[in-house]
Image: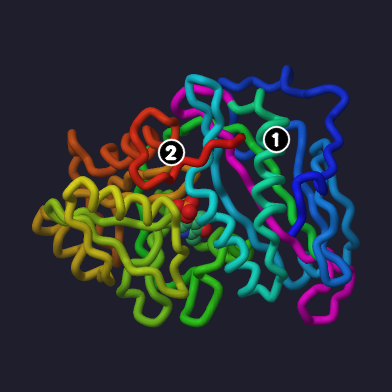
Amino acid sequence: MSSSSDLKITPVTASKIATVDFDNLTFGTVFTDHMFECDFKNGEWQTPVIKPYGNISVPPSARVFHYGQAVFEGMKAYKDENDDIFLFRPQENYERINKSAERLAMPAFPKEYFFNGLQELLKIDTDWIKKGKGNSMYIRPFVIATEGAISASPAQEYKFMIVLSPAQSYYAGEVKVLIAEKFSRAANGGVGFAKAAGNYASQFYPTSLAHQKGFQQIIWTDANTHEYLEEAGTMNVFFRIGDKLVTAPNNDRILDGVTRKSVIQLAQDNNIEVEVRQVTVTEIKEAAKSNTLLEIFGTGTATVINPIIGFSHSNEEFDLPKLDNSYASFFKEKLTNIQYNIEEDPHNWRIKVS
Ligand SMILES: *Cc1c(COP(=O)(O)O)cnc(C)c1O
């Protein structure tokens, strides 16, 4: 393991921050002045660097382009009223990127490199993190296979990077979802549990077909029977039946979301009954017909909680009621208050960047 002095920092000569309109950010399109980069070669991770954000150079034969050896993470930093910066359960993201990497036969990234690099990057670009609820810094760590060789085997060379993109909370509009009856995002024994880049690529086509039918997202079902509800788009999914919350258990088809496990914990803390078990399409349609299905929402770092207002399956459409005291808004408020250092944090999820 390396000490912090091993990180080499080359700052920009002139910041581009003045060119950015922080009141009109489109998610994931603006990047800060700096990026973190660390190469893996000769069997080890080399000296990490922080340098000006810019293009990277890799050969056209880099295996990432041919065989999709690429994994990533999504996390956020938040600034409180005192200009302190906080991360939310970052250890979870660190462990998950290495779990994802292992599944794609990629090397694990050292913990000290990850946390030291991330903290130094956030500090050097601290002016880009705006305070006030809703503002955050979206953090995108990722690893790609850079070795130039197109034989079908794991690469010997990789690049680990972190880029930062300032974000505002955004209203995703009213989200209606289509329950998948034909396409699947994951299968038993596959890579569904990993944040593998290819999992996203394979969702784009079915999702664009859903768009054409007027639905913003797909609720993915199990590949064998299309009867078990698994994830909503790129989010975990919860159903509220009566006063009870239900969500599918993690398995190798479902991404172990940090927001998901935080919502389960917050439900337990607040005496909301939560069942982690398989959820069937039949059950949800019956609950919708008997008006006991009160809410569906997705959970993920980018939007936190994403309420779903209706769904369709086998040409039957269902609308969900509009509630004044939805669980979706309760959990969003609770979670963001913890993230922005507004509320107590009994589980020590909030980690101060220092
Ligand atoms: C990233 C992701 C999630 C959400 O995970 P969080 O840790 O809550 O951000 C859910 N499902 C899929 C498929 C994902 O890629």
Residue occupying the far left of the picture = 290
Question: Mark 2: few, some, or many residues within 10 Å (few <14, many ≥20)?
Answer: few
Residue 142 appears in view: yes
Q: Quadrant of residue 196?
A: bottom right
- Report the span colored magenta: 130-157
Mark 2, residue position: 172
Q: Residue at x 67, y 52 (%)?
A: 114
Q: Is residue 298 magenta?
A: no
Q: Residue 43's x, y, as percent?
A: 83, 71
Q: Amino acid at mark 2?
A: Ala
Q: Quadrant of the N terminus?
A: bottom right
- The image's mark for residue 31 is 1
User: Magenta region's main secondary structure?
Assistant: loop
Q: How is the image coloured?
A: rainbow
| 172 w.r.t. 287: above or below | above
Spot occupied by residue 14 in the image (x, y as percentages of width and height): 84, 22
Q: Is residue 226 left or right of residue 352?
A: left
Q: Quadrant of residue 227?
A: bottom left
> In this rendering, does residue 205 appear at all?
no
